[in-house]
Image (tube, rainbow, N blue to C red):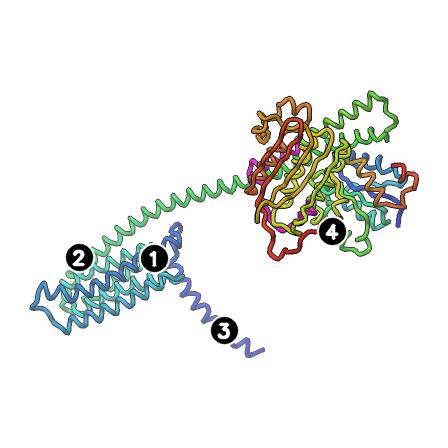
Amino acid sequence: MGRYILVVDDDPDAREILDLVLATLDIPVVQARDGREALDLIDEDRPLLLVLDLSMPNLDGRAVLERLQINPETAALPVLVFTAGNIGSELSEELNVPLSRLMRKGNLSMTHLRSIAIEVLGSAVRADIRIGL
Amino acid sequence: MTATTTSVPPKAAMKSSIWQIGKAWEWLTRPTESVRQQERRRQARLLSSMLVIFIPLMIVASILVPQFANPTVTNTFQTAIFIYLALGAALVLGGAYALSRTRYYEWGALITVSVISLSTFAVIVSNPAPFVIQSMTVYLSMALLLASILLSLRGLLVVSALNILATLIFPLLDPQVTYGTIVPSIAFDIIMAVIIALSASIRQRDLSQIEEQSRNLSKAVEQAEIANKLKDQFLANMSHELRTPLNAIIGFTEVMLMGLAGELNPQIERAAQRIHFNSERLLKLIDDVLDIAKIEAGRVEILRRPFEPAELLESVEMSLRPQATKKALKLVTVLDPNLPKQLFGDAKRLEQILENLVTNAMKFTEQGSVTISLQRQSAEEWAIVVIDTGIGIPPHAQETIFEKFRQIDGTSRRAYGGTGLGLAIVRELALLMDGNVKVKTSLGSGSTFTVTLPLLVPEGTSNVWKTPN
C-alpha cells in the first residue's frame, strides 16, 4: 500500500485547497483531475485515503465508487466524498458511503475535512499532528 | 430436413392468402385517417343498439299494421314468416351489437350493413315487381348510410358499387323487370352515395382540421416539455457552476484562516473572516434561491418511502454540528421513546425542512441551545419541533416570516445574515407534503417551530426505536 492521499476533483482550485489542507498531515498528496486518472493511480498504488468529488468529466465520482466497491481489493479503501451538491442520508445510501464520510463544500469544511481525515487515517498520521488538533 | 423444406411452400402460400384477405379487410375498414377508432366504435355501438330496438318494433308493427290498415290482406302464414324473418334479423343484429361491444366491432358493423343489404335484396328477389324494386332500393341507401359511418369512405364506395351491381342483375333474373324500371333506383343510389360521400368528406375536413390542431398542440406541449427539461438542466448546471468558484473562495479563505498560508496579521485575519462569512452567505443564498425556484416551478416531487426517523435526525444533527460548535450552542436531539423504527415519507424533504429550521434557529440564538425532536401528534400525524433559546420574534413579524422574499430587505435579516428564504422553503415543503408550520414565540425567550405532517408507520413496523442510553 502506498503512503499517500489521493485527491480527485476537476476544479484545480479545489485540488489546490485540498492539497494545502491535507499536506499538514505530513502525508504526500497526489492529485487526479477525473475518475479515469484516479482509477489509474489507484491501480498503480493504493492510497491511504481517497478524497473524491462527485461531478467530474470522463468518469464521475459515482462511477469511481462503483468500480472500487465491486473490486474486493479496493472495496475497503477509505473514501471521503467531497461534493458541491446536497448531502444527506439518501446520498449516503445511494453511494454506499457512511454519512460521516460525506462532506459538502463550503461551510467550515476544511477544518472538518482535516479532522475527519485524521480520524480515518488513524495511526498513519504522526502522533504529534494527531494530538495537535 | 427434407420434410421441413417440403412443408414450407404450402404453409407460405396459405399465409400469403390470409395476408391478402387481411390486407383487403384492412383496406376496407382502415379508418379514414382522422376518424379515431374510439369514435367509430361508439358509432357502431349506437347504430347497432338503435337497430336492436328497431327490430322488435318492426315485429310488433308487422303484426298490427296489416290488421288495422287493410284487414282483407291479412294472411296468417305470411305474417308468421315475416315474424320469423324479423326474429332472425333481430338475432343477427343482436349479435352484431354484441360484437360492437368487443374489439371486433368492425365485424359487427359489417354484419349490420350486410344484413340490411341482403334482406333488401331477399325481399326484391322473392317478389320482383317494379314497385317493390323501386320502394325497396330506398332501403339500400340505409345500408349506404350505415357504411358511410361504420366503414371508411372506401368501404362506402364498395358497398354502393355492390348495391348498384346487384340492382343491375334484377332485369336478368326476371323478364318482367326492365332496365327502365331500375333506372330510378340506381339513380337514387348514386345520388345518395354522392351526397353521403360529400358530407363525409366535409366532416373529414373538419376532423382533419381538429386533428391538425391537436397535432400542433401536442407538438407545442412537447416543445414546452423539452424547454422545461433544458431549463431544469440549466438550473442544475448553473447551481454547480455558481458553487464551484464560490467554493474556491471559501476554501482558500479557510486555508488562510487555518494559518496554512502563513501567519496573518489581525487586519488580514479580520478581512479573511469577513470574506468567509459573506461567501457562505452568498452560497446559502444561491442554494435557497435555486430551491425556491424549483418549488415554485412545481419541480419538487414528494417521494414517499420508508425511512428511519432516528437516522434522519442524527444526520441533520451531524451536518449542522460544526455551525453549532462555532457559535458555542448546544445542539440537542430528543428521540421520542415511542418513535417507530421506520416511517413512510420523503426523507430528503424532511431533512431539508429540519436543516432550514435548525439553521434559522441557530442564526437567531446567541447562547443556549437548539433542540430538535420528532413527536407523534396523532395516529398519522407527526410534528417536527425545533426549539431555540434565541431572541424570539416580535408579534408583528410572526405572520410574515414564512413569506417568500419578504424578509430579504428586512434590516434584522441584514444584521443576522441569510436570505430569509429558509422558512419560506420550510412552509412550501410542508404544504407540498400536506402539512403545516406554526411558530410559538415571545420576545427574548426563544421560539418553537412546529411542522405537522402526515407520516404513516409502514405496515409491519411494530418494533419501537429504543433510545440509546
Would you identify the image quadrant in which residue B116 lies?
bottom left
Is residue B299 part of the magenta span, yes or no?
A: yes
Going by the numbered disc 1, the residue's amino acid type is: Leu
Task: Work out how far the residue at label 1 is from the one at label 2, CA to CA, in angstroms.
Answer: 26 Å
Within the magenta stretch, is there residue B346? no
- Disc 4: which residue: A66
Where is B169 relative to A5, above or below? Answer: below
User: Mark 2: which amino acid?
Assistant: Pro
Discs 1 and 4 carry the same chain letter: no
Residue at mark 3 shares a chain with residue at mark 2: yes
Q: CA distance from mark 4 to mark 3?
A: 55 Å
Q: Secondary structure at mark 2?
A: helix
How many labels, in total?
4
User: How far apart are the two marked residues, 3 and 2, measured between alpha carbons?
Assistant: 51 Å
Instruction: Mark yes or no: residue B439 visible.
Output: yes
Pick the residue in front: A5 or A31.
A5
Task: Give the structural element (helix, strand or loop) at label 1.
Answer: loop
> Which chain is mark 1 on?
B
Q: Within the image, what quadrant is residue A81 found in?
A: top right
Q: Amino acid at mark 4?
A: Glu
As measured in the structure, the alpha-carbon distance from the residue carrying label 3 to the one carrying label 1 is 35 Å
- Identify the residue at the far bottom of this view: B3
B352 relative position to B139: left or right: right
Q: Which residue is mark 1?
A: B151
**Disc 3 target residue:** B9
